[in-house]
Image (tube, grey):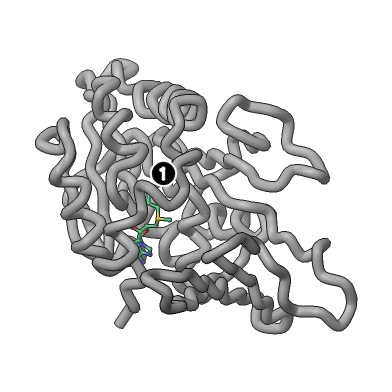
Amino acid sequence: MRVDYFGEGVAARYDEDDPGMFAPEVIAPTVDFLAALATEGAAGSGGAPQAPSALELGIGTGRVALPLSQRGVLVHGIDLSAAMVARLRAKPGADRVTAIIGDFVTATAGRAFRLVYLVYNTINNVTSQDDQVECFRNAAAHLEPGGHFVIEVGVPDLRRLPPGQAVVPFTVRPGRLGFDEYDLVGQGMVSHHYWEKDGQWQNLSVPFRYVWPAELDLMARLAGMRLRERWADWDRAPFTADSAKHVSVWRKPG
Ligand SMILES: C[S@@+](CC[C@H](N)C(=O)[O-])C[C@H]1O[C@@H](n2cnc3c(N)ncnc32)[C@H](O)[C@@H]1O
């Protein structure tokens, strides 16, 4: 049974907690990139024309799904959190997006898509290698032939760890503290969040499994897909040794 770390309390402040992720300069290139892939080949090459379509794994409150749907892409999504999906369903344009409550490692949307995507480090929410492998298999099973699977995820930040240290701060400001605690043997990480509300400190600890680009490529191959391109961001900056994250695209054979 998978734990839902995006319950009512998190969902209520999700859209305000990191406003930069909702900024037009972040959303526009993300949606441009995804809309192009959802549309590529959708006109059909000889066969019946197919509509541009996309499945978002971990659709959340619709940060990406809603603007992508506004671009004429038929968007479906899967999410574990009823609270996050309730926020999505309350937004304008949500009637054009189909959201299913379920675990994207195993759930099925009941049809195939031109594009499946998993953004904002959400592959790391899947905390075992077996389940990450299974997530790639499920993504591939939802792709039409010639379709693409896209992941946006940070490169594991282990270079910040001096020998003997396993905890690094990611936020230290008044009323808000956050620390990442690494398990270098198990390839795991727990993000510890602390915030002050009405004079009381609250906390939430969320487990992740960090994963390297090469390991993701192997998962894609196990699922019958091959790497098509890897960039440092949605604007297609080159991916280098210093890139903090990557946007990777794997293709299911046509
Ligand atoms: C960081 S949020 C990202 C939401 C949205 N994709 C975005 O970019 O704003 C991660 C989302 O993935 C969902 N999630 C995490 N693990 C999941 C799983 N195994 N199955 C379905 N949803 C999952 C969470 O409930 C949450 O809504």
With 174 as the anchor, is 223 left or right in this view? left
Q: Is residue 100 above or below residue 98?
A: below
The number of numbered badges drawn on the structure is 1
Q: Residues within 10 Å of mark 1 (few under 14, many from 20)?
A: many
Q: Is residue 114 above or below residue 13?
A: above
The residue labelled by disc 1 is 117
- Residue sitting nearer the eye, 36 or 93: 93
For ligand 1, tell me if the residue under mark 1 lies within 8 Å. no
Q: Residue at x 21, y 46 (%)?
A: 88
Q: Residue furthest right?
A: 163
Q: Residue at x 69, y 67 (%)?
A: 169
The quadrant in which the N terminus is found is: bottom left
Q: Is residue 48 above or below residue 58?
A: above
Indicate the quadrant of ligand 1 in the picture. Answer: bottom left
The quadrant in which the C terminus is found is: top left
Question: Judging from the image, what secondary structure is the residue with disc 1 in?
Answer: strand
Q: Is residue 36 above or below residue 248?
A: above
Q: Residue at x 27, y 65 (%)?
A: 80
Q: Splitting the image into 4 quarters, where does residue 108 fall? A: bottom left
With 147 as the anchor, is 55 left or right in this view? left
Q: Residue furthest left?
A: 95
With 33 as the anchor, is 160 left or right in this view? right
User: Can residue 129 be seen in this snapshot?
Assistant: no
- Residue sitting nearer the eye, 43 or 235: 235
> At which x and y percent is residue 100?
18, 55
> At which x and y percent is residue 95?
10, 36
User: Can residue 12 be seen in this snapshot?
Assistant: yes
Q: Amino acid at mark 1?
A: Tyr
> At which x and y percent is residue 240?
79, 39
